[in-house]
């Protein structure tokens, strides 16, 4: 790792003019960091938006253009899948929420432009979730986790059903009934999230799809990042930076954000979002909100330690930005994510099962 | 580094190849030292620059044997694909393992240390098929004769590489032994000449062919059996920036003792066979379909069953001529 290159990606995404004096080693660090962080498409978009793409050397631009090409095809296939899913779930007579990557893309948000994702995340009310699953089974999706322990893990403890995969096309769907695992002790009002969701219109698709309201979308994205394993920390934080930036002019957005998060018991990840988005990408946050956030974070007992750990996950896992100490801190964060997801009386038996009994070969 | 708007790093603006240093000019000690350096040995492979790092002396020897004629890129050039094959930790001393990394990521499990050279080749194939997404990439050998391209697609074990080596030794230009890279915008075959991968009996068959084949180090007991590579002919390496119009598509099927039997294929059959041999066809969506359609439309397709090189080589030389 070199101290001179370790923030190349974050700084370029924040301010593309940063690339002005880049030499070949700088471009290599930038492209490598974007490849390992799943941010190559977003980087290309950012360079296009600001006109900097014209000054990118052709050999480098080749890789950015390839990322844009793949992302455009990825988007086409997402729209095809959503048309099929929309048909399948129309009979529920209830809104189907798109979450994360699929939501950003479907709603035409900047965060979704040329962003790749592996799964399509959907959310429906808990009382219809099994009907939704059945409808998808009838259209060719199949469970991937056949092991009865895994089935119970998801169905009893998690906020989503076990992932299902389409038997010919391979598309994976995660079907959620809320946005955080109930075992984490945070219980947001899922019915309220669904009631406040906004419809999105998609080509060749029945009008069933919705996305979370701006405040809720930021809240969910923040939970996903800071309650998760932070393996794609920089990518997820960039999503949040784009969301905050785009929602900022919406009337009432900033005044509603922290009170709503507090009411839904999800204030902490939103506070971390404000801090890290501002630190890493220089996100423009109204001073009143930013200082309120700083004050509330400072009141938490483990603030400095968590901050130090999370900071490590905001560097790409690339030789130009990684170090043994940063890797060690990532490992601790990985353990932390499990601790946050379940209380110890559930977590210890779960980890013991995974370590000693569970056999993937048998599950398949 | 004069990156902006100059020719030094332009892929379309053809890179000057001739005045460059070639790998054969590097003394063995310097080659080993470059492989161990931070930036690695920067090797020009077709239109790409690979930055290769390794702490295996066998990789230095393998590169020296197989890539002698390749230009070494200048340090001012952008490296497209940084790769690494190394042993690490205490395993370096006890039954060393070869670990492949691309951009620090480790896409495969380690292999025994004596397969380091083969792992570098397989790793590079993986990198190209997963990252060079301006091309429809088909698992096929590609050669040029009279300015037109022959694409030979087949599953492993069909004799494709042996036949490819035999044709290359008879003066056909080698574009690739493994990867047909069809330009999505121009439909042309992009050369990526690299060593020809030979398995088991085909190593000895190729060794005995006329044309002075150079065979690199042999790796035993790999997942594919015994593996060695034949150096790509120098003329092919020197022409590595010249794309080729595809003209013939062949599905070779070697079977010991079989008489020669060549039949023409319909377009639909050729299309579907190529799809099943493609690495990134589904990922490219409509664009992939259009590129495949253009490829198949402009080519004659054949299936050839044969029992020896003596049968198939003359047959191909009569089919693959510009007048045909």
Image (cartoon, coloured by chain):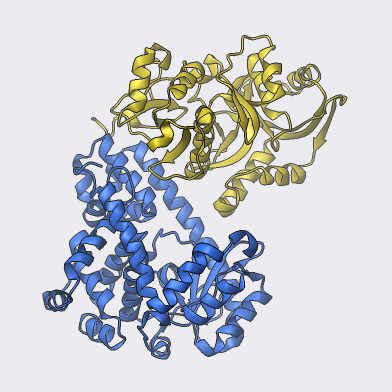
Residue B197 visible, this angle: no
- Please state, as top left, top right, bottom left or bottom right, where the C terminus of chain A lies in the image: bottom right
Report which quarter residue A312 is drawn in.
bottom left
Say which residue appears at 72% left-offset and 28% top-offset: B159
Residue B36 on image: x %, y %:
34, 27
**Residue A40, horizontal then vertical, whole percent:** 37, 51
Whether residue A214 is visible, yes or no, is yes
Q: Nearer the viewer, residue B51 or A83?
A: B51
- Letter of the chain shown yellow in the rendering: B
* Image position, residue B242 (x, y; %): 51, 25
Q: Residue at left 32%, top 24%?
A: B74
- Left/right placement of residue A264 relative to residue A289 reads right
Question: In which quadrant is the N terminus of chain A drawn?
Answer: top left
| Horizontal side of residue B91 vs B149, given as left or right | left
Decide: is A332 above or below A154.
above
The shade of chain A is blue
Q: What residue appears at the point 60 percent right and 72 percent down from the top-left corner?
A: A84
Q: Report the residue at 36% width, 34% height from top.
A: B79
- The residue closer to the viewer here, A61 or B188, is A61
């Amino acid at each position: 790792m070199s101290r001179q290159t370790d923030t190349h990606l974050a700084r370029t995404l924040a301010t593309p003019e940063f690339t002005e004096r880049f030499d070949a080693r700088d471009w290599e660090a930038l492209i490598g960091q974007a490849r390992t962080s799943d941010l190559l498409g977003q980087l290309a978009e950012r360079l296009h938006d600001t006109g900097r793409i014209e000054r990118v050397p052709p050999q480098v631009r080749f890789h950015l253009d390839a990322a844009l090409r793949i992302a455009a095809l990825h988007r086409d296939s997402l729209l095809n899948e959503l048309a099929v899913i929309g048909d399948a779930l129309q009979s529920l007579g209830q809104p189907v929420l798109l979450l994360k990557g699929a939501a950003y893309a479907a709603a035409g948000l900047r965060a979704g432009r040329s962003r790749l994702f592996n799964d399509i995340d959907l959310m429906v009310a808990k009382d219809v979730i099994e009907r939704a699953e059945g409808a998808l089974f009838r259209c060719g999706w199949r469970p991937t986790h056949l092991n009865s322990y895994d089935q119970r893990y998801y169905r009893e403890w998690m906020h989503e059903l076990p992932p299902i995969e389409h038997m010919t096309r391979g598309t994976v769907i995660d079907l959620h009934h809320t946005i955080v695992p109930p075992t984490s002790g945070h219980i947001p009002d899922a019915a309220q999230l669904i009631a406040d969701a906004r419809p999105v219109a998609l080509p060749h698709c029945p009008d069933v799809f919705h996305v979370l309201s701006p405040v809720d979308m930021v809240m969910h994205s923040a939970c996903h990042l800071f309650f998760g394993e932070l393996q794609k920390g920089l990518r997820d934080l960039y999503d949040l930076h784009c969301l905050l930036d785009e929602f900022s002019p919406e009337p009432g957005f900033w005044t509603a954000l922290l009170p709503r998060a507090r009411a839904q018991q999800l204030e902490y990840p939103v506070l971390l979002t404000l801090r890290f988005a501002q630190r890493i990408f220089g996100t423009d946050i109204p001073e009143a909100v930013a200082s309120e956030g700083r004050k509330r974070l400072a009141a938490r007992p483990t603030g400095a330690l968590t901050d130090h750990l999370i900071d490590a996950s905001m560097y790409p896992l690339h030789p130009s930005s990684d170090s043994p100490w940063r890797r060690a801190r990532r490992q601790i964060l990985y353990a932390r994510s499990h601790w946050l997801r379940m209380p110890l009386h559930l977590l210890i038996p779960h980890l013991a099962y995974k370590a000693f009994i569970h056999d993937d070969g048998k599950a398949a | 580094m004069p990156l902006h708007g100059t020719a030094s790093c332009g892929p379309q603006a053809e890179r000057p190849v001739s005045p460059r240093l070639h790998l054969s000019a590097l003394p063995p000690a310097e080659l080993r030292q470059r492989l161990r350096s931070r930036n690695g040995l920067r090797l020009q492979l077709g239109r790409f620059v690979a930055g290769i790092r390794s702490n295996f002396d066998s990789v230095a020897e393998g590169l020296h044997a197989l890539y002698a004629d390749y230009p070494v890129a200048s340090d001012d050039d952008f490296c497209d694909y940084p790769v690494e094959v190394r042993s690490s930790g205490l395993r370096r001393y006890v039954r060393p393992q070869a670990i492949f990394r691309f951009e620090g990521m480790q896409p495969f499990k380690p292999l025994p240390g004596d397969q380091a050279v083969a792992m570098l080749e397989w790793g590079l194939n993986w990198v190209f098929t997963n990252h060079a997404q301006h091309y429809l990439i088909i698992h096929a050998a590609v050669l040029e004769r009279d300015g037109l391209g022959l694409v030979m697609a087949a599953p492993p074990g069909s004799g494709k590489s042996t036949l490819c080596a035999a044709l290359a030794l008879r003066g056909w230009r080698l574009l690739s032994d493994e990867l047909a890279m069809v330009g999505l915008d121009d439909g042309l075959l992009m050369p990526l000449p690299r060593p020809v991968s030979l398995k088991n009996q085909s190593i000895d068959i190729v060794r005995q062919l006329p044309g002075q084949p150079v065979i690199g180090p042999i790796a035993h007991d790999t997942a594919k059996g015994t593996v060695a590579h034949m150096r790509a002919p120098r003329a092919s390496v020197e022409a590595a920036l010249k794309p080729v119009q595809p003209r013939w598509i062949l599905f070779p099927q070697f079977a010991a003792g079989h008489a020669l039997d060549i039949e023409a294929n319909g377009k639909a059959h050729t299309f579907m066979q190529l799809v099943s041999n493609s690495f990134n066809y589904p990922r490219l969506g409509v664009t992939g379909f259009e590129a495949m359609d253009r490829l198949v439309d402009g080519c004659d397709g054949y299936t050839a069953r044969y029992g020896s090189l003596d049968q198939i080589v003359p047959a191909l030389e009569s089919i693959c001529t510009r007048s045909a």
